[in-house]
Amino acid sequence: MSTLHPDELTARRLAGEAPGPSLGREFDRDLGDGTLVSDPAVRPTLVLGNRDFHSITETICSWAENKPGKWWGPAFLISSSIAGLGTVMIAYLIVTGVGVWGLNNPVGWGWAIVNFVWWVGIGHAGTLISAILCILKQKWRTSINRFAEAMTIFAVICAGTFPGIHVGRVWFAWFLFPFPNSNAIWPNFRSPLLWDVFAVGTYFTVSLLFWYMGMIPDIATLRDRAMRRLHTTSAGGKIEVAIGKVRALAYGFLAMGWRFSSRHWLNYEKAYILLAGIATPLVLSVHSVVSFDFAVSIVPGWHTTIFPPYFVAGAIFSGFAMVLTLLIPARELYPGMKDFVTSRTLENMCKIITVTGSMVGFAYGMEFFIAWYSASSFEQQAFIIRAMGPYWWAYAIMVTCNVVSPQVFWFKWARTTPWFIFIVSIVVNIGMWFERFVIVTTLSSDFLPGSWGYYSPTYVDVLTFVGSLGIFMTLFLLFMRFLPMLAISEVKNVIPQASPHGHDDHKANQGQGY
Amino acid sequence: MAHSTSTNPAPARAQTWGVLAEFRNPADIYHAAEKVRDAGYRRWDVYAPIPIHGIDEAMGLKPSRMAWLVGTAAAIGASGGFLLQWWTSAVAYPMIVHGKPYGAWEAFIPVTFELGVLLAGITAVFGMLAVNGLPRWSHPLFTSERFLSASDDGFFIAIESRDPKFDPAATAKFLESAGAIGVETVEGD
């Protein structure tokens, strides 16, 4: 044994050919919930608490079936009030015109586009988790994919609102679509803004379908439980029975009559992997197309080829931060959720944040290098102004939040301490909003110094953005209240009992893999 | 395997949809599925809360044809999307943009791609439902109280009465011998 290279020994142990002492550091086991083992030959458990199929169903369904904790009511009230405020602001904008925003002549795109890009970017983590990690067979994704996909849908709803109301006369928004019309005009398909309509529209549709299809078996589980409850509890008030019937009908309708047939599962799994396959290039294309809104123009500071990859990395970076912002409180508030969303899951997400944050930091540096290397004085000036001009504070916030803050996850303590991860995730969200702000306000100083101008938002800008956060949270709270928050059938599939071969094998736990 | 009334003439059986047998876990149902397959049944199915790994082989199922469906949809979506852009930009409403030829294809790539993905995605979901014969909100299996646990932790095999080899007593006995922990007859048609 002593002649074997440590990696070879690990490989043999992974293959089950050699036993052996743990190669990793023993103290790792004391951190968190025991899933943070750094020995690559030890596959930590994916679902804790020795759960069987029934206990998984029971726990996840109980979140949607029972009355939520006392926090839910106030949280919903606050979120929906903020959403209402945002809606009033949008109504005011539509009635009055985009002049209520702080847009001016050099800066024709303000907070609305900042918010649009920020929200679309946030959505990307959901698709990354559900599609790319699915293709890469990362089983730890099963505990967070439903959650992240819901976040995607609601983020894209918020995102789509902003360009929609930015067009000014929203009753002409149908001009964006290629409709045969009495004016005999057609949209300009050479405009990146029109590409955006198709990219974001496709992204929303495919994400919604992906989310819904993944939920069909789980909604069927809720349907069957609602039916059983109706059968068993004959007693009870008329109102309770009526509510029970409405639940059974609603879940029954949405479940499409799914009956867990293996012939159906075969097509279902194929369709799922195909959707993951098409969603993977889709998610990369969407933020690339969003970046074309800027990169295809000739504005200095925007006209760069680095934008597509840089936007995609930033999107995944901010999206993972938003998933963590939502997931960490939910993990505390819902009993039993920590058995599914383990310390290991959080740690993995922190690592992705550090990777994508470093990519974003590299892109910031490379932008400056290319500005210098291009020998274009306009390009150089744009970047000097970006970092040291009137918006230097936004640039400083961006670099601190996006480049410096994710580096804390090199320390094991930082990426295994949920409250700390939560704080960093919010810092990253703020940083990514400022990144979009820095890019959009590049408009304030373009080719002609005579037309330079400073942009500041009005209260309508600010409250519309705050309102979009309210819309997002309202939708998310409704999702947590009524729909299966974790992918029940997928989680069941990663526990050892799911294997048709290793049932009596006591080493079955070894078969689980992250 | 054709469904016809002449193979099942007994009027008492006309109301029997099939026989439903419950099994303990994925391993048991996997081996039972192999037995049902080898016994030559055709109109039967395994019901489980999860897609059991390898059950398609144990059941002798052909691979899913979803890939052909989705691939075709992607091709139609992409070519339709390209034609839409080319026709509107070069034929129906020609306009000089960026000094490029009317039919310059390079700018049409993003929307062509997106429309291919859009149609493929829609087809993957609705095609899957259609191939599976869904939505079907009413089904004889839903009349069985025991079957409600298929969505929780129950593993079932159902053999339908329209299977040529189906015989109420013999099929039930066969499923019991395959390791079922409970067998019942399901009514309906």
Image (cartoon, rainbow, N blue to C red):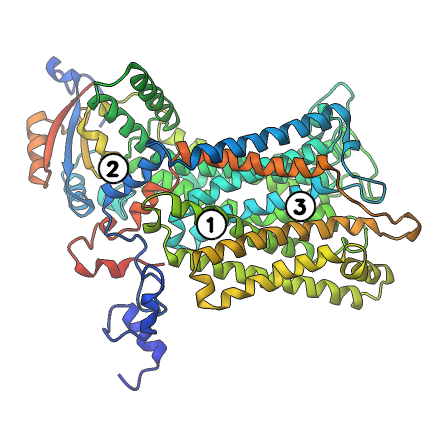
Which residue is labeled 3 in the image? A290
Let me know if marks 2 and 1 both belong to one chain.
no
Q: Give the amino acid at mark 3.
A: Val
Residue A92 sits in quarter? top right
Quarter of the image with the C terminus of chain A is bottom left
Which tag, 1 or 3, sits closer to the chain's start?
Answer: 1
Q: Which residue is mark 2?
A: B152
Residue located beneath label 1 in the image: A129
Mark 1, secondary structure of its residue: helix
Q: Residue at x 47, y 63 (%)?
A: A414
User: Circle 1: is it few (<14), some (14-19), or many (20+) Cα within 10 Å?
Assistant: many
Residue at the spot 11% in from the left edge and 38% down from the top edge: B180
| Residue located 43% across and 50% down the image | A134
Q: Is residue A333 visible?
A: yes
Q: Using the image, name the chain to which the residue with label 2 belongs.
A: B
Left or right for A364, reference A388: left
Can the viewer see residue A282? no
Residue A2 place in picture, x, y as percent: 28, 86
Mark 3: few/some/many CA within 10 Å (<14, 14-19, 20+): many
